[in-house]
Amino acid sequence: MGVKNLWRLLLPVGHRLSIETLSHQTLAIDASIWLTQISKACRDPETGRMLPNRPHVRIFLLRLMRLLYHQIKPVVVFDGM
């Protein structure tokens, strides 16, 4: 999924930003990337099963809340699912 070697191609022109620099702007979020990252992080390392109490939903909301705290308007996009 995605463009092969995209990050290697963008490496020469890419740079990191602090979250504060995005204040008062609108930011598009690819929900599938967030959900994939979160679901991998919320698995039991021994069994590979999802942890109880739906932590992936909580983490998704916490990420959104962090953006809102910094006055960033998130637009969550569910594309390609």
Image: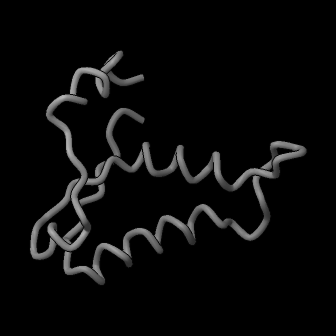
Residue under the point 53% across and 47% down: 37
Can you give x and y, in whole percent of width and height, for residue 16 in the image? 25, 52
Can you give x and y, in whole percent of width and height, for residue 69 in the image? 30, 83
- Asked whether, in this view, residue 31 is left or right of residue 25, the answer is right
Residue under the point 29% across and 23% down: 6
Q: Residue furthest left?
A: 24
Q: Is residue 73 above or below residue 36?
A: below
Q: Residue furthest bottom?
A: 69
- Asked whether, in this view, residue 79 is left or right of residue 34, the answer is left
Q: Quadrant of the N terminus?
A: top left
Q: Quadrant of the C terminus?
A: top left
- In depth, the one of 76 and 13 nearer the eye is 13
Residue under the point 14% across and 34% down: 13
- In depth, the one of 15 and 27 nearer the eye is 15
Q: Residue furthest top?
A: 4
Q: Is residue 8 above or below residue 67?
A: above
Residue under the point 31% across and 28% down: 7
Quarter of the image for residue 80 reads top left
Q: Is residue 33 above or below residue 2?
A: below
Quarter of the image for residue 55 reads bottom right
Q: Residue furthest right?
A: 46
Count how many numbered circles sit on residues in the image. 0
Q: Which colouring convention does the figure follow?
A: one colour
